Image (cartoon, rainbow, N blue to C red):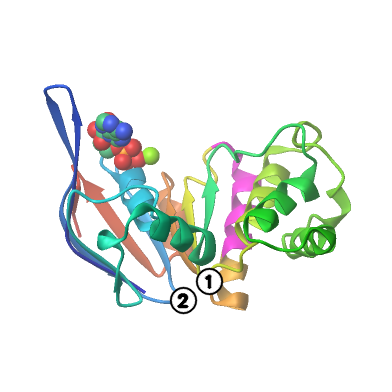
Amino acid sequence: MYELNGISKVYVTGKTHVNALNNLSIKIHKGTIVAIVGKSGCGKSTLLNILGGMDQPSSGTLLYEGIDLSRFNSPKLATYRRTEVGIVFQSFNLIPPFNAWENVAMALAIGNVARNKRKKMAIDLLEKVGLANRSGHLPSELSGGECQRVSIARALANNPKVILADEPTGNLDSVTSKQIMDLLKALNLEFRKTIVMVTHELDYAQNYSDEILTLHDGKILN
Ligand code: ADP
Ligand code: MG
C-alpha cells in the first residue's frame, strides 16, 4: 500500500534545523494494522502527516499503490487526502456547534455527496460505529469515547482505503480506549481498511497491530 524509500523531513525555523525523520525506508502492507510507537518528539506525527498528504517529505520517495506522492503538487495531494485516507485525531477535532450527524455530513459535503443524501448516509456511518442513537447530540453532550466514534464515522465518510490515527485513545480512559481499539480492529477485519496508528500504549500496539514500527530520533529501531 505504501512504500517509503529514504524519507527524510527537516523542519527549518530560523537557524534551527530539526531532522524529524531520518532516511526512513519502510513498507506498509494493504489490509494490515501498523502501530507507530516511540518517545515524544521522535517523529511519529510527522510520519503520519506525510502518509496522509498533510505534509511533504524533504527528500525520499513515498509510493502509494505505486504512485509517487512525493512528486504531487498540492491540488493533487488534496485530492489524495479527500479520496484515499480518513484521519482520526487524539482531540477528535469535531465542530462544536454541529451535532454528530452534521459533523459526519460535513465530510460527506467535502466528498461531493449530494445534500439530500447526506443525513441518511451520516446516520448509516454513525450506525457502523455504534452511535446511531446519539446522532442528534452535540459534541459537548457526548463522552470522549462517543466523540471519538463520531470522528471515526467522519473518517469513514469518503470510504477511504486507509485510516490514519494519531494517538486515537490519547484522551480516553482505559476502558473506553479498548472499545475504540476494538472498533478500529473491526473496521480492519470487516472492511479491510489499512490502519496506521500512532500510540503511546505498547499494550495496544502488541494486541491490535500486525506490525510495530518503533521510531527513535526519526529512525526505525526494529
Ligand atoms: P511525535 O509525534 O513523535 O511526538 P513529531 O513528529 O510531532 O513527534 O515531531 C518530531 C520533531 O519535529 C520534534 O522535535 C518536533 O519538535 C519537530 N517538529 C514537529 N513539527 C514541527 C514544525 N512544524 N516545525 C518545526 N519543528 C517541528
Ligand atoms: Mg505526535
- 40 to 87, vertically: above or below: above
Q: If you read the primary sequence from the N terminus, does the residue marked by circle 1 or circle 2 appear first?
A: 2
From which residue to which does the magenta span run? 171-184
The reply to whether dot 1 and dot 2 touch (C-beta < 8 Å) is yes
- Residue matched to label 2: 31
SS majority, magenta: helix
Left or right side of 7 for 207: right
Give the mark count: 2
Q: How would you rate the neighbour count of disc 1 (Cα within 10 Å): few for under 14, some for 14-19, many for 20 or more?
A: many
Q: Quadrant of the N terminus?
A: bottom left
Rendering quadrant holding ligand 2: top left
Q: Residues within 10 Å of mark 2 (few under 14, many from 20)?
A: some
x, y (%) of residue 75?
42, 55
Q: Return the x and y of residue 67 as percentages of the image width and height.
A: 31, 73
Q: Residue at x 81, y 34 (%)?
A: 141
The answer as to whether callout 2 falls within 8 Å of ligand 1 is no
Residue beneath disc 1: 193
Of the residues shown, which amino acid type is indicated by label 1? Lys
Question: In the orientation shown, which residue stands out farthest toward the top?
Answer: 14
Disc 2 element: loop
